[in-house]
Amino acid sequence: MRRELEVTAVGPQALVVDRGRPGWAHIGVPAAGALDRPAHALAQRLVGNGPDEAGLEVLLGGLAVRVSAATTVALTGPPGGLRVRRAAGGERTVPSHQPVHVTAGDEVVVPSPTSGLRGYLAVGGGIAVDPVLGSRSADTLSGLGPAPLEVGTRLPLGPPTTIPPVGTGALGVSAAPDAVTVRVHLGPRADWVDDAAGRLRAGTWTVAPTGDRVGVRLEGPALERAADRRGEELRSEGLVGGAVQVPPDGQPVVFLADHPTTGGYPVVGVVDPAELAVFAQLRPGSSVRFSPVATPPPDA
C-alpha cells in the first residue's frame, strides 16, 4: 500500500517545509523553509526522522489529514496538541511535543492553538514530494516548491527509518510569548538612521496584522533618517533573513524565510539568527523590543 497523507480539511494556510534551500540568493531565490526551525527540527526527531526530512507548517490550525498506513506523528510549536480520530472509532487528544502511533485510515486533526501562530506536524518517513533546488519547502514569494495544501491534496511519505518510542508524557511546551526582546546586530546601514542603536534600544513596537512568511511589519516610534541621509536613495542591496529594514515611513520590517533577496531601503540591523524563530509565533498586537549589539551576526 502506498504511504501517503490525504488532506481532508485546511485552515488559513498549511505548507510543506524543511530546512530550506540556502545558497541560491545569487539567482534571486530565498532560503524559505520552516519559520520556526527549532520546532520543525524537534517534530522530526520525535517521529524518528532525520534533520533533512520535510513536514507541515500549519498556520492557526484547521488542518486534518488521513493516513494510508501505520506511522508515527507529532505536533510541535504552540500548546494545544492534536486529535487523532481512529478509523475503528473513537478519538484521542495528544499533547503537543509528544509522538503518537496511528494506523491506516486514522485522521489527524490540528486544532487552532491557544497562543502562537504556527504548529509543525511531522510524520514518520517525512513528506516525500519532489525537491526543487535541493529542498521540498514551499516558497510563498517565488512560488517554488509544492503549492499550499488544499482539500484533496495527497502527499507521499518516505519509508520510516526508525520507530521511536512513545512515552506517557509530552516534552515541556511553553505558551508563545506576547512580548519579546531580541538581539539585533547593527549594520550594514545603521548610519542611515539617527542614533540607530539608541532608538532601537529605547523603542517598543507592536506586531502589525499584515505580516506573513516574507516579513513581520512593526508599528511604533518611527526610525527617522539621519539628517545627512534625508532625500538620498539606496541602490538595491542583498538581504538576509532577520534583516531589519526601514522604509520611508520609518516603521521597521523584520524579514523572514521567504524574504526577497534584494531591497532598496536601508537595513539598520539583523536579528540574531538564534532568536529569529520567535517571529514565527508572534501574533498581531504582540510587543517587540530590540537589544542592539555592535558585533556582526553569526552565520545563520
Image (spheres, rainbow, N blue to C red):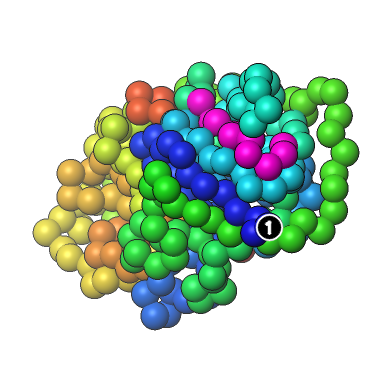
Lateral position of residue 116 relative to residue 216, left or right = right
Is residue 230 in the magenta section?
no
Secondary structure at numbered mark 1:
loop
Q: Which residue has dot 1 on it?
A: 1
Kindly identify the amino acid type of the residue bearing the numbered disc 1.
Met
Per the rendered image, the range of residues in magenta is: 102-111
Check if residue 104 falls in the magenta segment.
yes
Query: Looking at the image, which is closer to me, 211 or 132?
Result: 132
Front position in the image: 78 or 297: 78
Determine crowd level at label 1: few under 14, some 14-19, many 20+ residues with C-alpha closer than 10 A.
few
Relative to 300, 234 lies left or right: left
Quadrant (top left/top right/bottom left/bottom right) for the N terminus? bottom right
* Picture quadrant of residue 261: bottom left
The spot of residue 88 in percent (x, y) is: 68, 27
Using the image as rendered, state which of residue 3 and residue 97 is in the foreground. 3
- Horizontal side, residue 258 vs residue 230: left or right: right
* Image height of 131 relative to 163, above or below: below
Residue found at x 77% / y 56%: 160
Q: Position of residue 256 (x, y in %)?
A: 43, 51
